Amino acid sequence: MKIDKFIHKKPYLIAGPCSAESEQQLLETAHLIKEITDVFRAGIWKPRTKPNSFEGVGEKGLQWLQKVKKETGLKVLTEIATPQHVEKCLKAEIDMLWIGARTTVNPFYVQEIAEALKGVDIPVFVKNPIHPELGLWLGALERLNKAGIKQLAAIHRGFFSYEDSAFRNDPKWEMPIKLRELLPQIPIICDPSHIAGDREMIAEISQTAMDLNLNGLMIETHQNPKNAWSDAKQQITPKKLHQIMDDLVLRKTKTDDDFLKIKLKEFREKIDILDRKIVNILSDRKKIVEEIAFFKRQNKITIFQIERWFEILKFRKKDAVDFGMNEKMIAEFFELVHKYSILTQTKIMRNANGEKLENKRNG
C-alpha cells in the first residue's frame, strides 16, 4: 500500500462540533479554536439509529464550512456515506473527508465511495467499524488506496460492546496497535469523544492515545455543548479543548540517554524471562489437556463440560483478586486458553474418528 503522509506533527488535532447546526455556531466555534486546531470538523449528514433523530442539515452545511475555511484559514472536514456526498463535497472544495463506522462496516458502500473518488487524491480518514473486525478496517483502507487515494489515515473511535462499561464504545487499544503493526505507514487518529460518550473522560483518553503513540486526536467541540442537537454529553467547550491540549504530556518514543537505555533493557530482560516461563507452563498445561482428551475419547465423554468451565472462570477470577490483578484481563486470558484447549481436544477426537473410519474401510 502506497501512502503519502500528510500528517507531519503530533498531536494532529481535528476539532469541531458533532453536527453543523447553523452558520453562526460553526463560525463561533471555529474562531475560538483556530489557534490550536489543524482541521475543523462538522457532520452535515448524520447517519442515526432512529429515523426521527436529527440527521444533519444536509447540503447547506457545505456553504457554512466554506465560510469557516475562508474566515479562519482552517482546513475543513466532514463525513461522507454515499457517492452523492462525495460529489457535493468535491464541488464545494471541502479539504478532507471521513468515512464513519456505519459505512466502514459495509464493503459495498466503501467501494462505491472509492469509485466516486477515483482521480481525486483528497485526504480521507476511515473510522474503525462498529464491531472489532480488523479485516473490515483494513479492507476499507485498501479499497480507497486501490482507487488512487494516497493520503489516508485511520480513526480509532472504539467498538460496540454488549458488556457494561464506563465507555460509550470500548477502546480495545489492541486494535489500533494491531493496525499499526500491519500498516505502519498509516497515521492513526484517536476519537476520544466517541470512545468516552462523556466529556469528563475525554482528557484521560486523549492522554492514553498519546502514550500509545497515536498521531492525533479528533475531539468534538461546541461553543454551547449542553444545547447541542446531537451527542451533547460528549462535546466540550473551546475553553476545555485548550486546557486538554495544554495539559497533554508528549512522552518520548525512544531515548538517547545510555543509563535509561540500560535500565529499560534490564526491565525487558526480566519480562522476557517471565514470558518464557509462562509459555513453558502453557506447554505443560497443553500436555495435560491432551491426556484429558484421550481419557474422554476412551470413556465417550463430551469435550465441552460447561460446569467445569464455569468453575475455572470462578476460581481464576478469585485468583486475580488475591494477586491484585484485573479480573477482566484474567478472564479474557483464560477464555483464550480454554478456546485452544477445546480445539486441541477436538483435533484429537477428530483424528480418532478418522482412524476408526480408516479401519472400517480396511475392514
Image: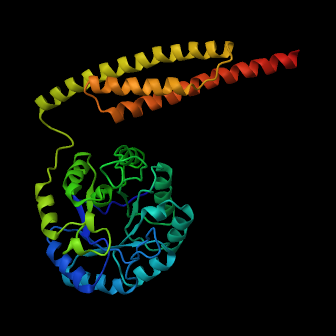
Side (left or right) of 70 relative to 120 = left
Side (left or right) of 258 relative to 19 = left
Along the line of sight, the residue nearer the viewer: 315 or 12: 315
Work out which residue is located at the far right of the displayed protein and give it: 363
Work out which residue is located at the far front of the displayed protein and give it: 307
Confirm whether residue 13 shows in the render.
Answer: yes
Side (left or right) of 222 relative to 110 = left
Q: Position of residue 26 (x, y in %)?
A: 24, 80
Residue that appears at 41% across and 16% down: 281
Q: Quadrant of the rendered structure where residue 68 is?
A: bottom left
Above or below, comparing residue 306 to residue 44 in the picture = above
Count every numbered label the image shows and give the total: 0
What's the image's color scheme?
A: rainbow
Q: Position of residue 263 (x, y in %)?
A: 15, 27
Q: Position of residue 118 (x, y in %)?
A: 50, 72
Q: Quadrant of the rendered structure where residue 359 is?
A: top right
Along the line of sight, the residue nearer the viewer: 175 or 3: 175
Quadrant into which the C terminus falls: top right
Residue that appears at 50% across and 74% down: 82
Along the line of sight, the residue nearer the viewer: 272 or 42: 42
Side (left or right) of 255 relative to 158 = left
Residue that appears at 87% across and 16% down: 362
Q: Position of residue 137 (x, y in %)?
A: 46, 55
